[in-house]
Image (spheres, grey):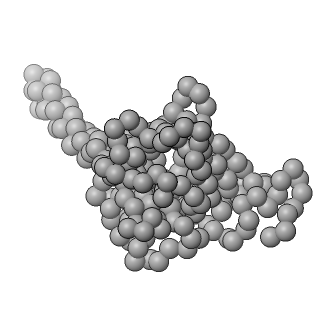
Amino acid sequence: MTLKSIPKFAAGAIAVVTLVLAVTGAARAQSASALPLVDLNRFAGSWYEIARLPTKREKGCIADVVDLIASGDKRNEYQLVNSCKAKNDYTDVTNADIKAVKNSGGGKLKVQYIWPFSDKEWVLALGSDYQWALVGSPNHKGLRILSRTRQMSPDVLATIKQKAASEGYAVDKLAMTLQTGRTPMAKVNGTKSAE
């Protein structure tokens, strides 16, 4: 290789690296598809988290993640109470407001923990009887598999994971959530409640 050929070689190498990055980025940038119609009144209630892509918000959660969704003061607005067993054996609780994005049919949700910041959460799949849900962020950073019960059949879980993978989510990075049967509010203000 001569000195004159080095710039050509470097330009070719840069072109190959750029192409590889563009292809892998395009795969990850695949747009997720929210369900066109979700009955949010049926969606409300108690959900047990079966698995999730780890996020900063739930970093301290080690087990028993439960979401309670209740109707808010206005139409298509809901309250979210997320509780989990934290590393110190106490219950960590966060609250948020949920609102259906206008003209989304309820499949696209705006979740606001602290005003004015909000997250986008899309309902990607639902069991026909609203017994399970697949919810994820359109940027593919967040994903949660939820169930009305603490346990989910392996076949149903595999089907949900396959759906998530087809939407471009990194299902190989899903963390399974330990559901111990512990009452989510077992310790409040340093005292134990009956379990």
Rendered location of residue 111, percent (x, y): 52, 39
Q: Quadrant of the N terminus?
A: top left
**Is residue 1 shown left or right of residue 18?**
left
Compared with 129, 81 (above or below) is above
* Residue 58 visible in the current orientation: no
Compared with 92, 99 (above or below) is above
Rendered location of residue 20, percent (x, y): 21, 42
* Residue 152 visible in the current orientation: yes
Residue 113: which quarter of the image?
top right
Residue under the point 59% across and 50% down? 70
Residue under the point 54% across and 37% down? 74
Rendered location of residue 36, percent (x, y): 31, 49
Residue 108: which quarter of the image?
top left
Q: Nearer the viewer, residue 7 or 160?
A: 160
Rendered location of residue 85, percent (x, y): 71, 58
Residue under the point 62% across and 67% down? 178
**Is residue 90 shown left or right of residue 173?**
right
Q: Nearer the viewer, residue 60 or 126?
A: 126
